[in-house]
């Protein structure tokens, strides 16, 4: 069978191909000279399958799309407190190259604007690392996200450096406020080299899916960022990644994303996919015009807005039945399904509470559960242990050991684990009227 996904991507690009609004970035010669007709897209799944259309293998410089990744690398290297000392996490509502510092703290507002990104770049390597060392750390680090060795386009870098008056001013401002103590020209040059790393839409989609997958590169399997750092990067990218258009982007499109003046945009749907587009003409915020329109389409047509509440989830409780066993004990069998997170566990806990006090045996049937997250497991473990304290015999049907109760490290050492309901002998279904009658008989 031919997958419909590439056809869908072809069709999506075709809808926007004729849109010639916007202009190439003009302050970096190679970007000004780039072919404005180029148009490409790639979607990468969390297991590294890439769906592409158009110029998905065409190389361009990563520009500001490097910022979230370098932020992640700096966080891994020096830790969150050190980075937060230097750069905040508040949206600036300003252009990406604004000469601005937070009025109270004197530090850059966030790591997505140039001021913050240069400060973050200065953290790479040992204190006082050379320009060459920092540049190599940035190149090698970005390569880990892409799952292949990326290269720097020196021509792009030299062209940007030739007219980097604004970035030089920002860097000198940072130095004068002691945000860093390095040579300001070296920091700008390193930052410009970081921006001149060449990528394709395919690379960017893999890089995005590394963030979507909690920091694990889907191609190499390498944990490039720890889950905590990955979360920090995504949270800052979501709130600050699109600069003075961040609010519009998140409300209308709702895919945490980062743009670059080369015309690339990448977006991350945590736990789902990484997406990247390339088209050089930009809007007034420095975001690709066609890129933004394609992201809007994908958000609407693939229901990818991160704030869309999921379809009313199927109840976690699949069945809740009562039986009487051969000894005349009331056996309650509560069968769960799906993915159980904190809110699902709350549902189950509420159902476990039986004010009639008629239950003698409580069977929690997890055969149709795919996953229980850490907090839900702790909540359920605590509740089952309280049922035991109340004198109720607790039985788990948990063939995949989702509750981690098998073995010596079990949090519920006394719990009985069974594979089949046949073990609970002689069950007879209790009808509602009989259940009521039994409840009434219970003091
Ligand atoms: O610092 C600059 O101006 C460029 N190297 C990168 C700017 C950029 O990509 C802004 N994003 N849309």
Image (cartoon, rainbow, N blue to C red):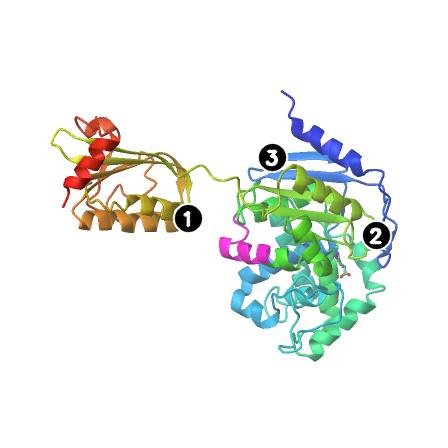
Which numbered marker is on residue 443?
Answer: none
Q: CA distance from mark 2 to mark 1?
A: 49 Å
Decide whether the magenta segment is chiefly helix, strand or loop. helix
Q: Secondary structure at mark 1?
A: helix
Relative horizontal placement of residue 441, taking residue 41 as reference (left or right) = left
Of tags 1 and 3, which is closer to the observer? 1
Tell me if residue 424 comes above or below residue 92 in the rendering: above
Relative horizontal placement of residue 326, taking residue 317 as reference (left or right) = left
x and y percent of residue 321 in the render? 28, 33
Answer with mark 1 or mark 3, whichever residue precedes in sequence.
3
Tell me if residue 125 comes above or below residue 51 in the rendering: below
Q: Give whichever of 223, 255 is nearer the camera.
A: 255
Q: Residues within 10 Å of mark 1 (few under 14, many from 20)?
A: few
Label 3 lies in ligand 1 vicinity (Cβ under 8 Å): no
Answer with mark 2 or mark 3, whichever residue precedes in sequence.
2
x and y percent of residue 240 in the render? 66, 60
Of tags 2 and 1, which is closer to the observer? 1
Tell me if residue 307 comes above or below residue 362 in the rendering: below
Answer with mark 2 or mark 1, whichever residue precedes in sequence.
2
Label 1 lies in ligand 1 vicinity (Cβ under 8 Å): no
Q: Residue under circle 3? A: 49
Which numbered marker is on residue 343?
Answer: 1
Q: Which residues are magenta?
A: 223-235
Q: CA distance from mark 1 to mark 3?
A: 32 Å
Which residue is at 53% across, 65% downward?
80
Relative horizontal placement of residue 432, taking residue 39 as reference (left or right) = left
Q: Secondary structure at mark 3?
A: loop
Q: Give whichever of 310, 14 is nearer the camera.
A: 310
Q: Quadrant of residue 1?
A: top right
One can see residue 150 in this view = no
Q: Residue under circle 2? A: 31
């Amino acid at each position: 069978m031919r997958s419909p996904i590439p056809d869908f991507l072809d069709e999506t690009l075709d809808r926007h191909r004729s849109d010639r609004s916007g202009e190439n970035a003009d302050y970096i010669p190679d970007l000004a000279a780039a072919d404005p007709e180029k148009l490409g897209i790639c979607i990468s799944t969390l297991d590294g399958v890439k769906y592409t259309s158009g110029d998905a293998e065409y190389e361009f410089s990563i520009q500001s799309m490097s910022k979230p990744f370098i932020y992640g690398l700096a966080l891994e290297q020096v830790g969150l407190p050190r980075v937060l000392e230097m750069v905040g996490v508040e949206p600036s509502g300003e252009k990406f190259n604004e000469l601005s510092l937070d009025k109270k703290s004197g530090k850059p507002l966030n790591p997505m604007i140039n001021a913050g990104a240069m400060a973050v770049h200065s953290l790479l390597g040992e204190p006082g690392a050379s320009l060459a060392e920092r540049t190599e750390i940035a190149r090698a680090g970005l390569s880990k996200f892409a799952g292949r060795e990326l290269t720097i386009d020196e021509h792009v870098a030299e062209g940007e450096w030739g007219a980097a008056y604004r970035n030089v001013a920002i860097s000198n401002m940072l130095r004068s406020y002691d945000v860093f103590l390095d040579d300001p020209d070296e920091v700008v040059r390193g930052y410009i080299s970081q921006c001149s790393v060449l990528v394709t839409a395919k690379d960017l989609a893999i890089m995005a899916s590394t963030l979507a997958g909690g920091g694990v590169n889907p191609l190499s399997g390498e944990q490039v960022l720890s889950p905590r750092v990955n979360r920090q990067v995504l949270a800052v990218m979501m709130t600050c990644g699109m600069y003075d258009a961040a609010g519009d982007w998140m409300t209308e499109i709702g895919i945490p994303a980062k743009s670059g003046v080369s015309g690339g945009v990448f977006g991350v749907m945590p736990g789902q996919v990484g997406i990247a587009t390339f088209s050089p003409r930009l809007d007034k915020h420095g975001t690709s015009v066609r890129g933004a329109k394609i992201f809007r389409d994908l958000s609407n047509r693939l229901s990818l807005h991160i704030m869309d509440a999921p379809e009313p989830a199927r109840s976690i409780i699949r069945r809740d039945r009562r039986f009487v066993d051969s000894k005349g004990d009331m056996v309650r069998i509560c069968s769960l399904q799906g993915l159980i997170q904190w809110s699902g566990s709350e549902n189950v806990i509420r159902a476990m509470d039986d004010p009639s006090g008629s239950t003698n045996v409580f069977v929690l049937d997890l055969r149709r559960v795919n996953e229980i997250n850490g907090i839900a497991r702790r909540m359920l473990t605590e509740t089952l242990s309280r049922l035991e304290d109340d004198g109720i015999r607790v039985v788990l049907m948990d063939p995949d050991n989702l509750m981690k109760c098998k073995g010596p490290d079990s949090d519920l050492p006394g719990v009985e684990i069974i594979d089949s309901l046949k073990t609970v002998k002689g069950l007879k279904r209790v009808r509602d009227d009989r259940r009521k009658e039994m409840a009434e008989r219970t003091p």
